[in-house]
């Protein structure tokens, strides 16, 4: 993805990236590490990311070397694994953000005690409900946790909605929020990483392109403690939801 100055940011070589970077970034989101299911999914996403970076680099080398036999099944496999990774990463972020927003809403409206009591009364086999009960108890008992959740929701806003943009186009063949649209994605190879690159569209306009590797790097960037300003969030949302220009006379 291009930088604001228009210069392309050259990504790190895949062998320089450690699997723990993605696990640490995702696990740093408040309450995510407290949930075994979500933390396990974060580990799985990081593991497959490492595997895919190797496939992507092999794909890049095969395209650069004219003497290399191009096996179409490898390309198909890369495409399939890329889509599955994007779907999994999106669902993890969606699940965590829903949990975080629930905790914030309950804390702001005085509903924590009622929700905690309701979930804590669930049978012992309902591990998910009991986990959420324990998490909400932490939110109630630790005064600073709600603000940390608010900050993390803001920090994850752009990464989540970029994932959503690509995911909806791949899974629903639509633009996000536009059920009447029809999108056919044609992935291209990123010239630096070999990762599959997708056009993010608004009607006839290609707003930007985003590769799977760039999505993973954006998630790795969650370890940056800086919280984006409301202005930067609003600017991104305006870009994401902007209507395409009218070509009528």
Image (tube, grey):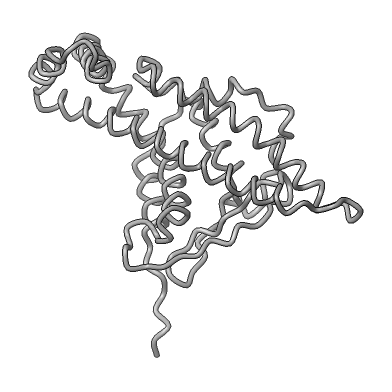
34 vs 247: above or below:
above
103 vs 11: above or below:
above
Residue at 34 percent of width and 29 percent of height? 96
Residue at 41 percent of width and 46 percent of height? 161
Residue at the extreme bottom of the image, as rendered: 249
Asked whether 48 or 188 is in front, the reply is: 48
Asked whether 28 or 245 is in front, the reply is: 28
Image quadrant where one finds the C terminus: bottom left
Name the spot of residue 99 as percent of width and height, x first: 28, 28
Residue at 38 percent of width and 63 percent of height? 242
Left/right of residue 122 with respect to residue 212 in the rendered view: left
Left/right of residue 212 with respect to residue 202 in the rendered view: right
Residue at the extreme right of the image, as rendered: 67
Location of residue 128 (image quadrant): top left
Left/right of residue 44 with respect to residue 128 in the rendered view: right
Name the spot of residue 144 as percent of width and height, x first: 27, 15
């Amino acid at each position: 993805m291009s930088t604001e100055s228009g210069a392309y940011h050259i990504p790190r070589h895949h062998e320089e990236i450690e699997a723990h970077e993605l696990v640490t970034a995702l696990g740093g989101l408040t309450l995510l590490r407290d949930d075994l299911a979500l933390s396990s999914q974060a580990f799985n996403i990081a593991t497959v990311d490492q595997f895919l970076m190797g496939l992507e680099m092999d794909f890049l080398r095969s395209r650069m070397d004219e003497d290399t036999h191009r096996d179409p099944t490898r390309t198909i496999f890369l495409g399939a694994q890329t889509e599955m990774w994007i779907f999994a990463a999106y669902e993890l972020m969606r699940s965590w953000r829903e949990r975080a927003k629930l905790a914030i809403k309950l804390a702001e409206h005085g509903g924590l005690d009622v929700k905690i009591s309701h979930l804590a009364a669930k049978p012992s086999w309902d591990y998910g409900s009991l986990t959420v009960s324990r998490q909400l108890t932490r939110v109630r008992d630790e005064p600073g946790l709600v603000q940390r959740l608010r900050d993390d929701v803001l920090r994850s806003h752009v990464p989540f909605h970029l994932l959503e943009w690509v995911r909806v186009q791949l899974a629903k063949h639509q633009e996000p929020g536009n059920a009447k649209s029809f999108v056919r994605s044609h992935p291209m190879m990123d010239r630096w990483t070999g990762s599959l690159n997708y056009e993010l569209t608004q009607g006839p306009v290609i707003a930007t392109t985003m590769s799977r590797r760039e999505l993973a790097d954006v998630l790795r960037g969650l370890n940056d403690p800086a919280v984006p300003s409301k202005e930067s969030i609003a600017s991104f949302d305006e870009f994401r939801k902007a209507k395409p220009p009218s070509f009528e006379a």
